């Protein structure tokens, strides 16, 4: 009995008859797929805004370091000019002197008005006293305005973050002497994106709005990531200028907040379309390193050896490209 069973199994293998009754038929037909190219994208910030000193002086305090997260308006450094303190003292002394002179002038005006009532002085003397009061009042207002200007200059010593984001560099240290307009820190804000540099032969093929695949963050253990674990992004900008045989393009994708600015990761971008033949993955059988597909021919079912290409999705279904071994119209048995 065992010999009979072995003969039946051998006959099934030789004739290519299906070993199970549960199977479906897939007709091979051409499909158009995107031709992708793997390139490295560089993480860039939308805005790199320098926080500059508005006041010349000595850096007394630095409140941030490289990598610090800041919000727009946060004080990141304090600059002090010792001459401003002396100017404030001089302005305060001038204001006190003018206030004393104004007080005496008002006293003289009151006395002159009383004497004019009793006929002991002239109207000219009263007018002179009144003019003196007005002059000193205006001088006091000017001195107070000068004092406000000095106070505003002192307030400019607080260097505020020009945008919300991450601090990329701080080129000064505490105690450094800086000039007006000098950079205190560089802040990367406005979010992050990937900058690609593609060969110019692909310039006419890339289209704004095309979906792209972005690999995981590179690591020592997992490398630069694979297309199977990639996330979907979008091509948002193609630059109209080609430099050194390269065209630049920008890709937006979520999850770049933890990346370093300047860090690189793999991006698979569509650069054209091509027509392929494909089969479902379930139709592939591998024996001794060779891939086979069972097809239905004129003489029944038979297995043919095939060479496979890349995997892709067609209308939501997994497909494997077949480079050789099949032609359009072949009927493939899918278990």
Image (tube, grey):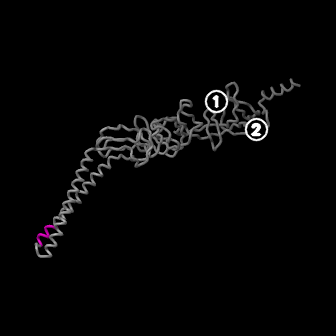
Q: Which residue is label 2 attached to?
A: 23
Image position, residue 169 (x, y; %)? 39, 38
Element class at badge 2: loop
Residue 200 can be seen, yes or no: no
Q: Which mark is residue 199?
A: none
Q: CA distance from mark 1 to mark 2?
A: 23 Å
User: Which residue corresponds to mark 1?
Assistant: 307
Q: Nearer the viewer, residue 70 or 149?
A: 149
Task: Name the element at disc 1.
Answer: strand
* Residue sticking out furthest to the top: 3
> How dense is the environment of label 2, judged by Cα within 10 Å: few (below 14), some, or many (20 and up)?
few
Q: Position of residue 93 (x, y in %)?
A: 22, 53
Q: Quadrant of residue 4 in the image? A: top right
Decide which of 331, 66 is in the foreground and name it.
Answer: 66
Q: Residue at x 74, y 39 (%)?
A: 24
Callout 1: few (<14), some (14-19), or many (20+) C-alpha neighbours within 10 Å? few
The residue that appears at 55% across and 42% down in the rendered structure is 232
Magenta includes 314? no
Lower position in the chain sequence, tag 1 or tag 2: 2
Position of 207 relative to 310 (above/below): below
Question: Residues in magenta?
Answer: 123-130
What secondary structure characterizes most of the magenta part? helix
Q: Residue at x 44, y 42 (%)?
A: 166
Q: Is residue 104 left or right of residue 222?
A: left
**Residue 94 visible to an observer of this rendering:** yes
Estimate the x, y position of residue 255 in percent, counting from the top left: 53, 42
**In the depicted view, which residue is nearer to us: 140 or 167?**
140
Give the camera-side residue of 70 and 97. Answer: 97
């Amino acid at each position: 009995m065992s010999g009979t069973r072995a003969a039946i199994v051998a006959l099934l293998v030789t004739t290519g008859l299906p070993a199970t009754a549960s199977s479906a038929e897939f007709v091979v037909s051409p499909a158009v797929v995107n031709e992708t190219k793997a390139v490295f994208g560089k993480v860039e910030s939308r805005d790199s805004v320098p926080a500059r000193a508005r006041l010349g002086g000595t850096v007394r305090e630095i409140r941030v370091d490289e990598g610090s997260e800041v919000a727009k308006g946060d004080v990141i450094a304090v600059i002090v000019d010792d001459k401003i303190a002396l100017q404030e003292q001089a302005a305060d002394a001038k204001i006190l002197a003018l206030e004393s002179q104004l007080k005496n002038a008002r006293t003289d005006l009151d006395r002159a008005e009383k004497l004019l009532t009793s006929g002991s002085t002239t109207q000219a003397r009263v007018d002179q006293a009144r003019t003196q009061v007005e002059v000193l009042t205006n001088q006091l207002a000017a001195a107070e305005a000068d004092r406000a200007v000095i106070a505003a200059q002192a307030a400019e010593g607080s260097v505020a973050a020009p945008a919300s984001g991450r601090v990329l560099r701080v080129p000064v240290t505490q105690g450094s002497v800086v000039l007006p307009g000098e950079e205190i820190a560089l802040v990367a804000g406005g979010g992050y994106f990937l900058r690609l540099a593609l060969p110019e032969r692909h310039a006419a093929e890339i289209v704004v709005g095309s979906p792209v695949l972005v690999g995981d963050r590179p690591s020592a253990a997992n490398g630069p990531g694979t297309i199977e674990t990639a996330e979907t992004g979008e091509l948002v900008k193609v630059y109209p200028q080609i430099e050194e045989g390269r065209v630049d393009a920008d890709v937006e994708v979520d999850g770049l907040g933890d990346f370093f600015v300047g860090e690189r990761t793999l991006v698979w971008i569509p650069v054209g379309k091509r027509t392929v033949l494909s089969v479902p993955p379930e139709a592939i059988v591998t024996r001794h390193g060779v891939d086979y597909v069972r097809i239905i021919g004129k003489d029944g079912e038979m297995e043919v050896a095939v060479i496979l290409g890349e995997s892709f999705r067609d209308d939501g279904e997994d497909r494997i490209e077949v480079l050789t071994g099949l032609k359009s119209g072949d009927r493939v048995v899918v278990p």
